[in-house]
Image (cartoon, coloured by chain):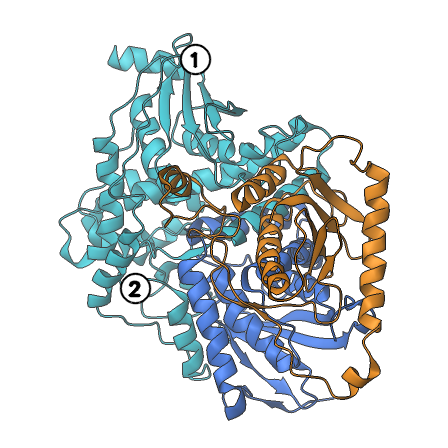
Chain colours: A cyan, B blue, C orange
Amino acid sequence: MCRFLKHLKPLTVMTFAVFALPWRFTRGWVLCELCIYSGMAPPGLIYTSRADTGGIQETAQDDTVYVSRLYSESLLSKRNEVSLSAMCFLYQGIIAHFHKRSKTLQEFEGMLSEFGAKIGLRLLELLNFRSSISPTSASAASAANTARSNVYSSNISTPNLTKPSANSVAVRDSANLSDPQLDHSSSSMSAATPVTQEKRTSNTTANTASTVATGTTTPHNKNEYLSEHITKMKRRDLKILDILQFIHSTLWSYLFRHVSDDLVKSSERSNEFMIIDNNPILTQFINPSFNHNGSCDYFVCGIISGFLNNAGFPCDVTAHPVPQGEFERRTVFLIKFNDQVVERETLRYG
Amino acid sequence: MPQSRSSSLSSSNPANAPQVRHLKALGDDTWKNKVEKVNAEFFHLTYGTIVAQLCEEYAGDYARVNGELFQIGYNLGVRLIEDFLARTALPRCDTFLKTSEVVSKCAFKIFLNLTPEVAHWNAARDSFDLVFGENPLAEHVELPPGASGQLWFSNVLCGVLRGALEMVQLDCDVEFVSDTLRGDMSTDIRVKLNKVLRDEIPAGED
Amino acid sequence: MSIEAILIVNKSGGLIYHRDFNNKTSATHLNGNDYLILASTVHSVFAIASQVTPKALKLSPPKIDFTIPYHPYVGVPNPNSSNTSNRRTVSSQKLGSFKGPDFFNGPFTSWNKSGIRQLITDHFTMYIYQSLTGLKFVALGSSVAVLGKNAAVSNEVADNFLRKVYCVYSEYVMKDPFYSLEMPIKSKTFDQSVKSLVDNLL
């Protein structure tokens, strides 16, 4: 099994593991703790690792033995936070970087979109995983809290099929997601679970370890794996509306801590849908001039398109600023599915 | 020339303790009550993607990637300092020791919710290390083979520190000395003061 | 105190922002060039003033407290006021990346120790707030502050106010990737935020 998997590319392994292998079989394997690389995976090679090793080891004689500690990291949501300032400054740096390299506005938007797509494809796997956590899993109280709010929000908020011209009702899941108290309740619950910090070697001072501990808002059990809390994987979304619901609620609340303000189907074209954000938080400080009107929102477009394209729904996503009433920065993300997607939907579901 | 490095001064000097406590309290209070927050994982994913993109673009020339990250960080730092000063309105640091405490207890706390330790002061007291347990911007990251000896993943932080300190008239050299991603014990950033830019200190401050 | 104009001067003495808030006739209105001259003059005079400290004071400096006390809700709607419309504005208005009803809520130290802080004339009062990075925020007020305690209080209020302009600057100008440092500010969102600060002051 190890040798076979060694030769597959990381993403293929992930897909393979998700759809083919029953969970009980893979439970014993650390490999099933699918890690989302930040794009730094060694191409084409997977290394097995042992759960008890916490570091990178290289033997003196044979330096091809490489034990990655990536596989022993938990994918449970740690609910850590950074300041909005830091995120906006980073975003501003990234935009300036792309702006320097692009000659036309279209090129700039394309680069930003491609950049976002890389994040979107990773979030597809990660969020699907996290929303598969069974609500009854007792030991995952803190993790389930995150997952439950994500899972239930997609059930509570109903798909909004109003025509875009009518007043759209904002589908906000108020109780769970935008409530900052959730952070405190989850941290208090997880405090009850035993906290075992991964033991680093003796050279690091105790101070450093405690500094790391104070850095995270939720002390988490490093040996607690996401897979332990999943009894049944969430089924892949096959309907357009289901996956859009997932984006509108789970993805949006992961990114921006609130569900998107509206999900609308276009009345004119059957392959167009719109997700509306009244106040995009990443671009709220950027001056909207006619030169760059809405271009900086293409990052989020990229996230959505990366998400949808990799979920099997090829589409194009564009951003359009549409101020309305008191919301001057209101942005509409227009999702145009390829014709084959709509055809497929009609054939399968009538 | 090997310089003797000592552990953190602040904890040993009782005169500084109330000042340090005040800075820590300010940092904690600002983080808790006065700062809007976002999902840290999203932040790390975004940062990781830009590093990966640069690595791809420069096809293995990791020195150039480091340089580019530093430059991005520098442009970020010269702006970030205004946000920090507007938010905290801290008076000018009269010693480099105070600077180190402000950077570790307030600045990192307010922006990234981290409190690195200040350690390894040199004999001349003009260089210190910021010690992080894990690499602060690397969540679920593994360096590709070949990059391990060359790429400093979080080099943007060095740029940020250099840019920010330059705007308050402190010319410093900031660089990584160790990184847990490379298998080292801790992640260390060394900040060395070259000189205070006295000519550029704005008029009106004595 | 009503604010007539706000200027922002960069560290080289160049004017990067100016905005008038009064509705006076164009006869008393300065044109763009005049503002540039005003900015560089303020910058130079500010620097000269810091050199003019009498020698005696320099030899035995008196213990001056440079702490500026906090005046609550200067420039932002007061959530505790009896005015119900004010309360509604507070709940809907968010201060960008600043959490809470106000940008800051404690006393702070002035960075301006020997430069000009307040200039009182028969026709207007000028308040100057300088940041650690050399950026000067200048507010021109219409009312004439009477010398003495009133002048001190109005100076404190002005410092609180100008620090908020600094906060707004760090939000809407520093986080804008299309703004180049030291260049004139052309941001609609910045204009709007400054205007709301000034409006809330009255």
Describe residue A241's horizontal placement relative to residue C78 as left or right. Answer: left
Residue bearing mark 2: A220
Judge whether A144 appears above or below A295 on screen. below
Q: Give the label on residue C60, or none.
A: none
Quadrant housing the N terminus of chain B = bottom right
The image quarter containing residue A47 is: bottom left
Contact flag, marks 1 and 2 (Cβ < 8 Å): no
The image position of residue B180, as x and y in percent, is 50, 69
Residue A249 in the image, given as x and y percentages of width and height: 32, 35
Q: In which quadrant of the rendered view does residue C85 lie?
A: top left
Label 1: chain letter: A
Q: Position of residue A42 (x, y in %)?
A: 51, 53
Check the picture and name the quadrant holding the C terminus of chain B. bottom right
| Residue type marked 1 | Asp
C-alpha separation, residue under disc 1 versus residue under disc 2: 45 Å
Q: Residue B103, relative to residue A98: is it above or below?
A: below
Q: Read off the residue under disc 1.
A: A339
Which residue corresponds to the image point at 21% horizontal and 32% vertical from the top-left? A156
Q: What residue is rendered at 78% in x and 83% in y?
A: C58
- Asked whether B166 or B33 is in front, the reply is B33
The correct choice, above or below, for A162 with respect to A157 in the image is above
Query: Badge 2, how many Cα within 10 Å: few under 14, some, many 20+?
Result: many
